[in-house]
Image: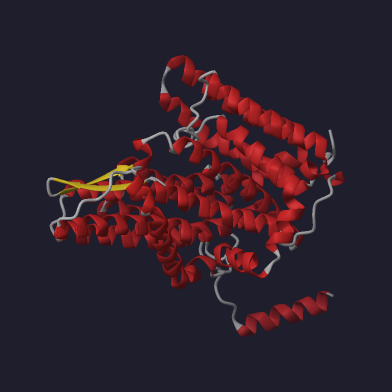
Amino acid sequence: MTSPHSIRIPEPTRDPAVDLVRAGCVVAVILLHSLMVGVTVTAQSPVFENAGDSGWWLTPVSWLLQVMPLFFVIGGFSGSIALRRSRERGGDGIRFTAERLHRLLRPALVTVAVVGILLAVLARCGVPAELVATAGYRFGQPLWFLGVFLLCQALLPVMLRLHERRPLVTVSLLAGAAVLVDVIRAATGADGVGFANLVFVWLVLQQVGFFLADGRIDALGRRARSVVLVTAVLALVGSFVLGIHSPDLIANINPPTTALLLVGIAHTVAFSLLRTRIAAFARRPRPAAFTAFVSRRTMTVYLWHMPVLLAMAGALALWALTTGSSLPAPASPEWWAGRPLWLVIVFAATAALSLPLARIEGKRIPLASPASAVVGSAVVIALAAVLLLLVHGTTTLTAVLAVAGWLLALRMVRPAPPRIAGATQEHTAAALVAA
């Protein structure tokens, strides 16, 4: 087995190709969610539905826009680079996890708090409880990403150590566990078993990101990488033909299946093959500006695009009801004709909201050195709050409980106390004497 000390780790600088692809993944997710919003009005009552249920179009679109596997690969790439850089400065995995907790929870806390208040306002304004519940449920659905990504990032220090010692064994065991979950699920018909792959599938993809960060994937010859790419695509298509996986890649995400592993491998190898060209394109002024804008506010943009979509859907329904106008059926020619304007408004509104809110995500807070048990407890509390919103939906009550849980988690992993000038001078003098 190759020694971790013999692996050539790339210099810990930002990779323009990786940053651009990550920003593109965020845009792809928003685009997909935007296309799935369907609004009609019947008998003086609005109807909100998944436009993807209105025809065959979602399946080919999902092949283009199902980028979550690649996002987790990039998360593993960036996380491993950041942790190794922290180690060089004397940091450790506990501090890394604490910093990730703050980076992910701060924007989520604000978003859920605002949504909870808005749901209360809607209820007080006489909006039917069923519609308020639907809005809360739709908002809460994409929060699975926050929970799973937080879990993967919290486990990243441990998983990176395992990768450095036994890279192939680690990823093989995780992939084998993911396959086993799919087999048990298919044999028993118990879909609930599949939720175990919320851990295994996404951790495998994070491990793939470690291989990318090590340079192992790029070190393969172009022919070898091309063979891997073609094999992954053929295996994915074969799983569709044999009925192992649904050809709708959105259906393979809840719960996640091993189809996402094939998607992630194909995307990662394709990225590796095109990396030089992507990097050259990413350095151009406009792509670089786009990348910089999204990279500084990735989680903020992701969290706020759903409130924007819900507000737009509600405004459209209200306009139709008050004017007596009809709305085109989802996936109809008239509906598709209106999608360009719809998408422009979605992206413009989300970008505008992210401008003042991004400072919450991007603010760097020096943290104390918490004990591992404290950080672990904070992560568990944070995940429990996300699970509450997913299972029971977002309501004013669950929003309050989730925000309280996140505040507690952040309080446990508290900022370092400000240094006192005298103490700093004393520390500096002592360092000089020791030197």
Q: Where is residue 316? Give x, y as percent.
A: 26, 57
Q: Is residue 34 left or right of residue 287?
A: left
At a point 55% along the width and 69% down the height, the residue shown is 365
Camera-nearest residue between 66 and 371 = 66
**Residue 370 seen in this snapshot:** no
Farthest-out residue, right: 6
Quadrant of the frame with the C terminus:
bottom right
Q: Residue 99 at what x, y percent from top left?
A: 57, 60
Judge whether residue 387 can be spotted in this image: yes
- Image quadrant holding the N terminus, namely top right
Tell whether 49 sits left or right of 160: left
The vertical placement of 246 against 45, above or below, is above
In this rendering, the answer to whether 420 lies above or below 12 is: below
Q: Residue at x 60, y 36 (%)?
A: 263
Give the farthest residue toward the top. Answer: 187
Identify the residue shown where x is 34% and y is 41%. Answer: 50
Front residue of this view, candidates 263 and 113: 263
Comparing 66 with 428, the one in front is 66
Q: In this figure, what is the number of numbered marks?
A: 0
Measuring from the top left, give residue 321's x and y in whole percent.
16, 55
Q: How is the image coloured?
A: secondary structure
Is residue 222 depicted above or below 348 in this figure? above
In the depicted view, which residue is nearer to us: 73 or 63? 63
Q: Residue at x 52, y 44 (%)?
A: 65
Left/right placement of residue 266 relative to residue 250 reads: right
Q: Position of residue 304 (x, y in %)?
A: 41, 59
